[in-house]
Image (tube, rainbow, N blue to C red):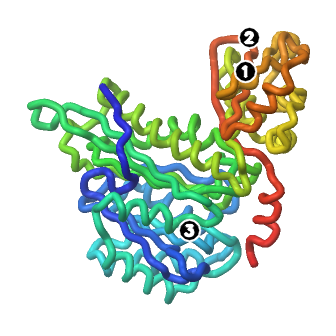
C-alpha cells in the first residue's frame, strides 16, 4: 500500500482541530499554549518518561491512557514544566482539565495535558484558565492552525516540527479504499536522551484502530525512533508521546495484525522517525545532525545501544563541531557502550554528500583523506557506519554536535 507525505501536522487528519494563544505562562509576546481537539472520542496510546521524577501532567496522562478512557482534547503549555510541584501540580492538572471540559462541553477525564519548561516553578492557574478560553475560541481545522500549535509548544527550539503521511486502507463498507491520515507535531531541543527527552510529541490519526493494538504499535515504534535520539544525555521529567485515533476516515477497523495493520504501522513509524530526526537536528546550539548506524550486530538491542553510544558521546559531538576527524572517538564510544564485540573485526566509515572516508578496518585506524573528511564534517548531516560483523541486526540513532551555544543556552535557561 502506497504511503505519501503530505503537508500539515496535527490537523491533517479528518476531525481534528487546533489552536494556539499568548497566555503569558512564562514567555511574553509569543504563543505559549496550544490545544488539539477531536470532533469524536479517540482511542489513545502513549509512552512516557522513564525518569523516576515525573511531572504532574505525565502522571495525569498516563493514568487516563492506561485506564482506556476515550480522549477528546490535549492542552499544552510551554514555559513551565509543572514538575517538582507536589500536590499543587496535580491540582493544576485537574483545574486545567475542568476548564477545558467546561469550555468544550466534554468530560475533564477526556482531556490530556502537557507542560514543558522550567522545573520547580508553579503554573499560574489564572493564566492557564484564561488561555483555555482563548484556545477554545480559536479552534480551527486548517493546516495553518496545526502549524501555529506546533510553534506554540516550542521552548528553546529554533524551528517548529510537524509532518504527515497518508495511506489507502480498505473501507468499512467494503466498496473500495479510503485515505487514512497520520499527522504529528513535536518539540524538543535540549534535555533530550529519551528512555521515553524534553520531548513532547502529539500524533493524530483518523484511522479506526483498536486501542490495545494501537498501544502495542506505539510502544514498538518508539524504540527505533524517539528512543534513538540524544542531544545532551539528560532524560527529562516530562517526556510524553501521545497518539490519538478518532476513527473518522471510514476504514475497516484494524483489530488484528495483517496487511492494513502493517501499512498503518509503517506510516506511523515514518511520522515518528521524521519528528525524531527533526528534534535531533534542532538540538540546543546545534549546527549539524549526526547519524550513527550499526550493522551486522548479534542482537537488535545491542545494535541500538552501540548506535546510541556514538551519538551520545560528548567527544564525538565535539569532534563533529570542531570538524576534526578524530576517528578513534567512534571506536572508543562503541567500546564502552556495554555490548561485547570483537574490535579486531570492526569497520567504521564516515559518509556524507561529498563521499565517504574509511576510518577503521578490522579494528585498525587507517590513513585517510583529511580534506575529504573536512568537507564531510562541514555538511549539515554527518553519518557514521559501524560494521560489527557479528550477525544480521542493525539500528540507527541520531544526535547533534556539542557547541559553545549549548552551554550559553543552558547557563541562563531559568533566568
How far apart marks 2 and 1 lie (CA) works out to 20 Å
Coordinates of residue 348 in the picture (x, y in percent): 78, 20
Residue located beneath label 1 in the image: 356
User: Who's the residue at 44% across and 60% down the image?
Assistant: 64
C-alpha span from label 1 to label 3: 42 Å
Give left or right: position of 66 versus 403: left
Could you tell whether 326 is left or right of 276 in the image? right
Q: Is residue 373 above or below residue 12?
A: above
Q: Can residue 338 be seen by looking at this rendering? A: no
Q: Nearer the viewer, residue 97 or 236?
A: 236
Query: Image check: 231 left or right of 395?
Result: right
Q: Earlier in the sequence, mark 2 or mark 1?
A: 1
Percent coordinates x, y for residue 408 in the rendering: 81, 65
Sort mark 3 into few (<14), some (14-19) or many (20+) by Cα contacts within 10 Å: many
- Secondary structure of the residue carrying tag 2 is loop
Q: Check disc 3 and report the residue beneath it.
A: 115
Q: Is residue 64 in sight in this rendering?
A: yes
Say which quadrant the N terminus sits in. top left
Residue drawn at point x = 29 percent, y = 72 percent? 106
Task: Give the camera-side residue of 104 and 321.
Answer: 321
Q: Residues within 10 Å of mark 2 (few under 14, many from 20)?
A: some
Query: How far is mark 3 from mark 2, CA to CA?
Result: 44 Å
Q: Earlier in the sequence, mark 3 or mark 2?
A: 3
The percent position of residue 177, horizontal first and vertical second, equals 17, 32
Residue 183 placement (x, y as % from top left): 38, 48
Q: In the rendered structure, are the residues bearing label 3 and label 2 in contact, judged by CB atoms less than 8 Å apart?
A: no
Question: Is the residue marked by circle 1 packed among few (<14), some (14-19), or many (20+) residues within 10 Å?
Answer: some
Residue pictured at 74% horizontal, 11% vertical: 389
Q: Quadrant of residue 388?
A: top right
Amino acid at each position: 500500500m502506497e504511503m505519501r507525505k503530505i503537508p500539515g501536522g496535527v490537523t491533517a487528519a479528518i476531525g481534528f482541530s487546533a489552536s494556539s494563544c499568548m497566555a503569558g505562562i512564562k514567555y511574553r509576546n509569543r504563543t505559549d499554549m496550544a490545544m488539539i481537539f477531536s470532533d469524536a472520542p479517540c482511542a489513545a496510546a502513549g509512552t512516557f518518561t522513564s525518569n523516576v521524577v515525573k511531572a504532574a501532567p505525565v502522571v495525569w496522562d498516563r493514568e487516563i491512557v492506561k485506564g482506556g478512557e476515550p480522549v477528546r482534547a490535549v492542552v499544552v503549555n510551554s514555559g513551565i514544566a509543572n514538575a517538582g510541584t507536589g500536590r499543587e501540580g496535580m491540582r493544576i492538572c485537574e483545574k486545567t482539565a475542568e476548564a477545558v471540559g467546561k469550555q468544550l462541553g466534554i468530560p475533564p477525564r477526556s482531556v490530556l495535558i502537557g507542560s514543558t519548561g522550567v522545573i520547580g516553578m508553579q503554573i499560574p492557574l489564572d493564566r492557564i484558565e484564561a488561555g483555555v478560553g482563548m484556545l477554545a475560541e480559536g479552534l480551527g481545522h486548517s493546516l495553518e492552525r496545526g502549524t501555529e500549535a506546533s510553534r506554540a509548544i516550542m521552548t528553546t527550539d529554533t524551528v517548529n516540527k510537524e509532518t504527515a503521511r497518508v495511506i489507502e486502507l480498505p473501507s468499512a463498507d467494503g466498496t473500495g479504499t479510503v485515505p487514512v491520515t497520520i499527522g504529528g507535531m513535536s518539540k524538543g531541543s535540549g534535555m533530550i536522551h529519551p528512555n521515553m527527552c524534553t520531548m513532547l510529541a502529539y500524533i493524530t490519526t483518523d484511522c479506526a484502530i483498536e486501542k490495545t493494538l494501537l498501544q502495542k504499535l506505539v510502544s514498538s515504534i518508539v524504540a527505533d525512533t524517539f528512543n534513538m535520539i540524544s542531544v545532551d544525555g539528560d532524560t527529562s521529567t516530562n517526556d510524553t508521546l501521545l497518539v490519538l485515533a478518532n476513527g473518522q476516515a471510514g476504514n475497516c477497523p484494524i483489530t488484528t495484525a495483517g496487511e492494513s495493520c502493517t501499512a498503518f504501522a509503517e506510516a506511523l513509524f515514518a511520522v515518528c522517525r521524521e519528528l525524531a530526526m527533526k528534534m535531533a537536528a534542532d538540538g540546543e546550539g546545534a549546527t549539524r545532525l549526526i547519524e550513527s548506524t550499526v550493522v551486522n550486530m548479534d542482537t537488535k538491542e545491542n545494535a541500538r545501544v552501540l548506535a546510541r553510544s556514538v551519538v551520545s558521546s560528548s567527544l564525538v559531538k565535539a569532534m563533529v563541531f570542531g570538524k576534526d576527524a578524530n576517528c578513534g572517538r567512534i571506536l572508543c564510544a562503541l567500546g564502552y557502550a556495554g555490548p561485547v564485540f570483537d574490535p579486531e573485526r570492526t569497520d567504521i566509515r564516515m559518509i556524507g554528500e561529498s563521499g565517504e572516508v574509511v576510518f577503521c578496518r578490522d579494528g585498525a585506524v587507517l590513513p585517510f583523506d583529511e580534506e575529504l573528511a573536512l568537507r564531510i564534517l562541514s555538511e549539515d548531516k554527518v553519518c557514521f557506519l559501524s560494521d560489527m560483523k557479528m550477525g544480521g541486526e542493525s539500528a540507527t540513532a541520531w544526535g547533534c554536535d556539542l557547541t559553545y551555544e549549548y552551554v550559553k543556552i543552558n547557563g541562563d535557561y531559568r533566568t
